[in-house]
Amino acid sequence: MRAWIAGGLLVVSSVCAGQAAFAPVVPGQGIDWPRDSGAHPPYRTEWWYATGWLDTPEHQPLGFQITFFRSNTGKGGTDSRSAFDPAQLIIAHAALSDPAYGRLVHDQNIARQGFGLAYAREGNTDVKLDGWRMTRAADGSYAVVADAANFALKLTFTPTQPPMLQGERGYSQKGPLPEQASDYYSEPQLKVTGSVVRPSADGRARAATAVTGRAWLDHEWSSTLLSPDAAGWDWLGANLDDGAALMAFKVRARDGHAIWAHAALRDREGRTTQYGPGDVEFTPLRQWRSPRTSTVYPVAMDVRVGALHWRLNPLLDDQELDSRESTGALYWEGAVTLDGNPHGHGYLELTGYAGAIGMEKR
């Protein structure tokens, strides 16, 4: 789900937008591929979210995440006289989980769209913020570059499967009301090649390390806030070792019960099964307390999807991401293994544990 409000991004939009009208997400519209891989400016918010597990030549595992957000502020527009169009904000996050370093490192950036320095283009994936960029080529592969603080990513994603449409042909409900929804597709089982510059404890420059691996790419756009009762969510995207793909999420109320839950499992033959709220459970098994914020996160989980169970175990406990300088959110987002049948590797996102998202108050 990639923080359905994009780690608090809809809060930013709601503050800026006032009573501006945004395009609605409606059932039955479907995904127009590959045109819908590009930006959708009339919608309030949108994100391209890539996560994955990498392997070094020494067979050391790494986890990575890079996300580009586009936020329609409700201001400006086609008649705007400014080269920095105030109608759109571009935000980017990147993170690397390196067991040798001991914790996740991350970086963030934000800018108004304009001057070719920050943009999200329509028709095909091409998003940029200064030196960070994600582009989709004619053959469907993605090039990702991020020169971040104390680490860097230079990766290529090559599809091995067609896009996975979430929900009903891409209409993904996030609450009991039909308008609480996003347009949402994933590209699982992406083959990764490239290099990373790993973090250095003393801040010195390090040489790039060649990597291979598997990635998961989410793309969502929406205009509607979550339920006013929502405190946060648990989300999982996982590449299973037999070639299957699993997405599951739970939107939590303030007392912890599920306001909404959903999962989709595409098996190795390409058959997708959708699971409703009663068929999806996230059960905490072990907690970790952040030494920086004292926030407690359930970093080990049992996830039930129908009759199937997986135990999630983190690559690192310390994978807390502080994006309060860009999207205003503090959350845990990290690489996890899936112990079950079949085994797998994925990313788990835990929001609202540092305090309820409270968007209805903003």
Image (spheres, helix red, strand yellow):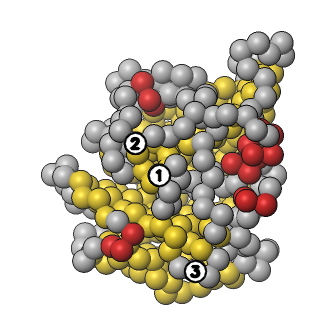
Checking the image for residue 27, the label placed there is 2
On the image, which quarter does residue 8 sit in? bottom right
Q: Amino acid at mark 3?
A: Gly
Residue at label 1?
A: 178
Alpha-carbon span between mark 2 and mark 3? 28 Å
**Earlier-in-chain disc, 3 versus 1:** 1
Give me the C-alpha separation between circle 3 and circle 1: 22 Å
Q: Mark 3 or mark 1: which is in front?
A: 1
293 left or right, relative to 211? right
Crowdedness near tag 1: few (<14), some (14–19) or many (≥20) residues, C-alpha within 10 Å: some
Q: Residues within 10 Å of mark 2 (few under 14, many from 20)?
A: some
Element at badge 3? Answer: loop
Q: Is residue 309 above or below residue 330?
A: below
**Disc 1 residue type (three-letter):** Pro
Q: Quadrant of the C terminus?
A: bottom right
* Residue 347 seen in the figure: no
Most extreme residue toward the right is 82
Q: Which residue is mark 3?
A: 256
Secondary structure beneath dot 2 equals loop
Q: Residue at x 67, y 74 (%)?
A: 353
Q: Nearer the viewer, residue 17 or 134?
A: 17
User: Helix or strand or loop: what does disc 1 sit on?
Assistant: loop
From the viewer's side, name the closer residue of 98 and 80: 80
Q: Earlier in the sequence, mark 2 or mark 3?
A: 2
How far across and down, in percent of the image, does residue 343 sit?
30, 70
Q: Nearer the viewer, residue 112 or 311?
A: 112
Question: Picture coordinates of residue 265 (x, y %)?
Answer: 29, 59
Residue 114 image offset from top left, x and y in percent = 75, 21
